[in-house]
Image (tube, rainbow, N blue to C red):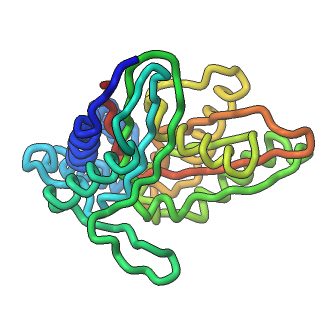
């Protein structure tokens, strides 16, 4: 067994979240640069150019990419041979508080969705944990902004709706969102499982998968390609001002489900595709 110091977890979470808020990953930058070259609208090209300039300056000046520095979503892969001397969740929340307080990041979390009082340090986190073989812990930290998240949707469909029904629901969700999620966007689609699993599949699709990867299954790959083409044909364009680059990628994740069910979730991610990963 390997004991991991919770202070290391705290410091790592703080480091990852601040870094994610300030520095866009290289693959995401390249995807935006490619989108600028391929965008057919001059206004769209100009907007993506401004987004890139913002991202370059954020890195250079060590300032946040966006004023909405998000609610912290933490994905953990914890080795079955790892033990902690204390409360792992407390350590994660201490790391979040450190990042958002010492880093002067905007604190966007309220303690109760009904009374709406700010917690003052952006805690608590949304934490998803998997136990995996080994003696390491993998931490993925993603500050998820409210704008794109608000445009996400879930629908409990039936098998008779089929692939065409799924396409229609995804396109309706993106079209209804328009410019609100700050396109060009990433589109995560979770299909299968049950109500909560579908939502998790969609969230994992845009945070845990690489922007330049493709689905393993043939049916999923085909659906990703068809949806991306259809979304970009909607004409919404960068920041909703028209163009051919509404989405940079569509990621489809699937999971076994009940014979009577076809749950489908759509999770949208704005052009600030922020996430950082570290293995301890």
x, y percentage for residue 6? 29, 38
- Viewer-closest of 10 and 178: 10
Looking at the image, residue 45 lies above or below residue 69 = above
Horizontal relation, residue 256 to residue 203: left or right: right
**Is residue 142 in view?**
yes
Question: Who's the residue at 66% across and 36% down the image?
Answer: 226
Is residue 77 positioned above or below 40 on the image? Answer: above
Nearest to the observer: residue 9 or residue 71: 9
Name the spot of residue 170 as percent of width and height, x first.
66, 51
Question: Which residue is painted at 31% across and 49% down in the image?
Answer: 48
Residue 200 located left or right of residue 1:
right
Q: Is residue 215 above or below residue 117?
A: above
User: In which quadrant is the C terminus drawn?
Assistant: top left
Q: Residue at x 38, y 45 (%)?
A: 87
Provide residue 272's location: percent of width, then percent of height.
Answer: 34, 49
Q: Residue at x 79, y 54 (%)?
A: 156
Quarter holding residue 135: top left
Out of 150 and 134, give the one closest to the viewer: 134
Please provide percent x and percent y for residue 263: 76, 48
Which quadrant holds residue 28?
top left
């Amino acid at each position: 067994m390997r004991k991991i110091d919770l202070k290391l977890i705290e410091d790592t979470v703080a480091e990852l979240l601040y870094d994610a808020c300030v520095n866009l990953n290289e693959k995401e930058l390249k995807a935006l640069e490619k989108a600028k070259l391929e965008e057919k609208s001059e206004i769209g090209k100009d907007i993506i150019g401004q987004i890139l300039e913002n991202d370059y300056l954020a890195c250079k000046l060590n300032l946040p990419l966006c004023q909405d520095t998000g609610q912290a979503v933490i994905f953990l892969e914890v080795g079955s041979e790892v033990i902690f001397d204390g409360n792992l969740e407390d350590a994660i929340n201490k790391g979040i508080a450190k990042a958002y307080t010492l880093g002067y990041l905007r604190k966007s979390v309220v303690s109760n969705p009904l009374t709406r009082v700010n917690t003052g340090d952006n805690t608590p986190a949304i934490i998803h944990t998997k136990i995996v073989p080994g003696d390491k812990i993998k931490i993925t930290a993603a500050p998820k902004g409210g704008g794109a998240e608000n445009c996400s949707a879930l629908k409990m469909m039936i098998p008779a709706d089929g692939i065409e029904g799924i396409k229609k629901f995804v396109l309706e969700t993106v079209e209804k969102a328009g410019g609100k999620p700050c396109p060009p966007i990433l589109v995560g689609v979770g299909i299968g499982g049950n109500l909560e699993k579908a939502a998790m599949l969609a969230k994992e699709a845009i945070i845990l998968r690489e922007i330049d990867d493709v689905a393993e299954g043939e049916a999923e790959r085909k659906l990703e390609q068809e949806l991306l083409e259809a979304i970009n044909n909607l004409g919404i364009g960068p920041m909703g001002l028209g163009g051919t680059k509404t989405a940079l990628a569509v990621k489809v994740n699937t999971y076994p489900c009940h014979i009577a069910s076809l749950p489908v979730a759509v999770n949208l991610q704005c052009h600030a595709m922020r996430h950082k990963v570290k293995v301890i």
